[in-house]
Image: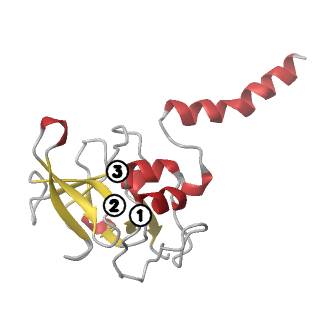
Amino acid sequence: MKTTSFFCILLLLPLFVFQACGQSKDTKSNAMTPVENNQGKPGNPYYSHTDTTKLNLTDAEWKKTLPEDVYLVSRKADTERAFTGKYWNSNDKGTYYCAACGNKLFRSTAKFSSSCGWPSFFEQENKKSIVFKNDNSLEMERIEALCGRCGGHLGHLFDDGPAPTGKRYCMNSIALDFVPDAK
C-alpha cells in the first residue's frame, strides 16, 4: 500500500511543478518544447515562418485559434511573471518567431543576459518584423513591441541595452517560438 501511494505522488508531482513555476501544461502551445514544423502549427492556419502578409483577424478568431496563455499575452497584452518563461535564461543558437503567427523576430545572436527575468534582445530581425506604439498603461511611459505581421503584443522596448544599438527588447517567452539551428 505504501508503494502505491509513493508512485501516485511521483505521478502527480509534475502537475504541481508546472503550477508552481507559472507554466501552462497546455500542450497546444508547445510551452516547453521548440517548434519543429516551420510550415505551421496544428489548429492555427495563420502560422507561417515564410508568409509576411499582414494579418487582420478579429479578437474572436484569435481566441479560437490560439492557446489561452498565448492569447492572453499576444492579444490582451498580459505579461508572464519574471524568471518563469522558457527562454529568459536560454543560450541556445537559433531563431525566435512570433508564437501567434510565426513571423521571424530575432536571431539568438542578438540575445543577451539582462538579468530582468525575460528574454532580452538588442536587435530585431529586420525593420518590419516588430512595430512599436506608446504604452501608458500601469501609470508608466513605455514603448510596446508588437509583431509586425499580426500586431500581437510581444513585450516592451527600452533604451538600456548593450552596444551596438543600446536597445533592450524585453519579450515574453510565451509570445515566442524558438527553432534551434541545424547541427
For badge 3, the amino acid type reads Asn
Residue at x-position 19% and y-position 76%? 127
Q: CA distance from mark 3 to mark 1?
A: 22 Å
**Residue with the mark numbered 2:** 152
Tell me the number on the disc at residue 58.
1
**In the figure, is residue 15 to the left or right of 169?**
right
User: Which quadrant does the N terminus fall into?
Assistant: top right
For badge 2, the amino acid type reads Gly
- Neighbours of disc 1 within 10 Å: few (<14), some (14-19), many (20+): few
- Considering only order in the chain, which callout, 2 or 1, is on the residue closer to the N terminus? 1
- Please tell me how many numbered marks the rendered image carries: 3
Residue at x-position 13% and y-position 59%? 167
**Residue with the mark numbered 3:** 172
Q: Is residue 87 visible?
A: no
Residue sitting nearer the eye, 124 or 28: 28
Q: Is residue 83 visible?
A: yes
Q: Residue furthest right?
A: 1
Residue at x-position 51% and y-position 58%? 66
Residue at x-position 25% and y-position 42%? 115
What kind of element bears circle 2? loop
**In the figure, is residue 136 to the left or right of 128?**
left
- Neighbours of disc 3 within 10 Å: few (<14), some (14-19), many (20+): many
For badge 1, the amino acid type reads Thr
